[in-house]
Image (cartoon, helix red, strand yellow):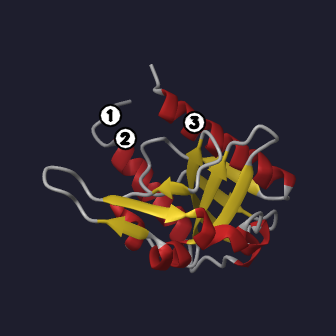
Amino acid sequence: MPSKGQLTGMVGVYLVAAELAQNGFIACTTSRSARGADILVTDQNCKHACSLQVKTNAKNASFWLLSSHAKEMVASTHFYVFVNLLKNGPEFFVVPSQVVARRMRTDPAEQGKSAWYSIYREKVKEFEDKWDLLRGAKARGSMVCDLALRSYKQSYRGMTT
């Protein structure tokens, strides 16, 4: 049975996919085990493609937690969408991965604990509802498709048909 946190994450992913459709994009959610990409996106002419990592808070929080990989997962075609689920509707921040890598915060590990990785709302507030940034994402070759295929192959490794 999914945890409350997992359900919150799923709500965020599908709200972002719905928002993308309303903005004229084609969106495909990935397997929940796909590393780094929750949604693959293209425009209607298939000229601009990108991947999205969605981070969702169940309330109006001042920060979002990140994985340690956020510093390395940087590409001109990779974005983060940070979501706060508010009573009057969600708020979305569409942020290039390069910006996330530069502005993220790392709180060092204390004895016996893990380090915390996060990004604060004040560091991304200028990216609120910046869906048009995705229209400028130009995939080099089929990099996004290659990344998605690689991720799916890893997810299904060892399964038989």
Looking at the picture, tell me which residue is in the foreground, 95 or 29.
95
Quarter occupied by the C terminus: top left
Whether residue 100 sits left or right of residue 29 in the image: it is left
Residue 78 in the image: x percent, y percent?
56, 69
- Mark 3 touches mark 2? (CB < 8 Å): no
Residue at 73% over, 74% down: 133
- Mark 2 touches mark 1? (CB < 8 Å): yes
- Where residue 158 sits, quadrant-wise, is top left
Q: Mark 2 points at which residue?
A: 156
Whether residue 52 sits left or right of residue 71 in the image: it is right
The mark that comes first in sequence, 3 or 2, is 3
- Residue at the left extreme? 111
Q: Name the residue under label 1.
A: 159
Dot label at residue 8: 3
Asked if residue 161 can be seen in this view, the reply is yes
The mark that comes first in sequence, 1 or 3, is 3
Q: Of discs 1 and 3, which sits in the foreground?
A: 3
**Which amino acid lies under the numbered mark 2 shown in the image of this protein?**
Tyr
**Which amino acid lies under the numbered mark 1 shown in the image of this protein?**
Met
Secondary element under disc 3, as helix, strand or loop, is helix
Looking at the picture, tell me which residue is in the foreground, 107 or 141.
107
Is residue 139 positioned above or below 157 on the image?
below
Total of numbered circles in the picture? 3
Secondary element under disc 2, as helix, strand or loop, is helix
Residue at 41% over, 53% down: 35
Q: Of discs 3 and 2, which sits in the foreground?
A: 3
